[in-house]
Image: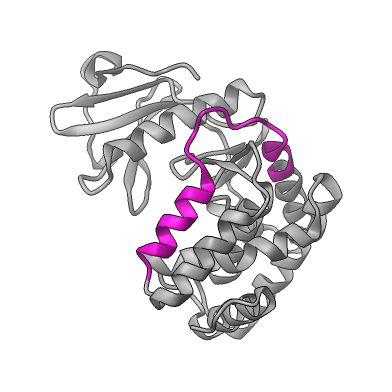
Amino acid sequence: MTQRTVIDLERTWPDGWRPDAASVVASGVSADLHDLGDGRVVKLFRPAVSDDMIAREAEMSALAHERGIAAAPALARGIAGDLRGIVYPLVAGTTMMRWIRQHPTRAGEAIDRIATAQAAIHKAAGGAGRRLKDVIATDIAYGPAPAAVQKAAIERLAALPDGEALLHGDYHLGNIMTGPDGLTVIDWSKAAVGHPAADLVRTEMLMRFGIGPDDWITNLWRDWAARRLKRSYLLAADVDPAAIDRYRPFVALAWLRARSAGRNRAFRAYLDAAMKRAGLPPL
């Protein structure tokens, strides 16, 4: 993997350009995306985001692009005063989340496309990135589960088959752009190397339990979309369906460390069922 040296970001900006409210084209929990006005954007991160996460996003986005994945590759990573950011090519189009809302009758087609794209990511080698098993084990160890559950889960996780696949780690409708050039996957800050089944489970959870609308109609759609995504993924990927079930309780336990589920009761039922199937102690 080619290392991207940290540079002076201001040297990459057009003459006279400065970030301000007018240049923001997207805003999220971790960063604001600013249009540089020359076919590039700069993602400026908030102070709470670690340097390691920024470096990982830059390196893994570039690696994915080098592997032939439809990813927006980091062009530069750097600092400008107290600002830290990554320069990317501007991606034309909109997020899949917005596209589906605009074309609800074509949702099935959209889910099939993103499932096929995820399978393509998993066919690429992840290189020297961090191991997803290590990430999951750490999240379980620092999560709220009782010590006995943590110990049993981490031991069982270690015994699961591993892999060398490139894994996005946060593959959901808001991180997939669709436009004239097809799909483009963005935000590789949670990328890792490991077994594809674990990454698919994470996507399944984001689809069903990520923060968002919680009305019963939306929840029915979410559950349907997660089922369709898994079915379409398995048609395109060389992954044993049983491996998905084996990884599910550990990915779900890891979820407990850093975020609340958007549908807490449904998520708890999902987690409890996965734990029971795996023969793990109940929470």
Residue plotted at (43% across, 70% down): 256
Report x, y in % for residue 221: 68, 73
Report x, y in % for residue 192: 52, 41
Residue plotted at (59% across, 45% down): 176
Report x, y in % for residue 71: 58, 32
34 w.r.t. 242: above or below: above
Report x, y in % for residue 63: 54, 25
8 w.r.t. 82: above or below: above
Q: Magenta residues, as a range?
A: 118-143
Magenta stretch encompasses residue 139:
yes
Residue plotted at (46% across, 50% down): 135
283 w.r.t. 170: above or below: below
Residue plotted at (53% across, 30% down): 72
Residue at the extreme left: 81
| Residue 267 as seen in the image, left or right of residue 178 | left
Q: Nearer the viewer, residue 251 or 90?
A: 251
Is residue 90 visible in the rendered structure shown here?
Answer: no
Q: Nearer the viewer, residue 127 or 118?
A: 127
Q: Quadrant of residue 83?
A: top left
Magenta stretch encompasses residue 67:
no
Residue at the extreme right: 235
Is residue 191 visible in the rendered structure shown here?
Answer: yes
125 w.r.t. 104: above or below: above
| Residue 160 as seen in the image, left or right of residue 86 | right
| Residue 55 as seen in the image, left or right of residue 118 | left
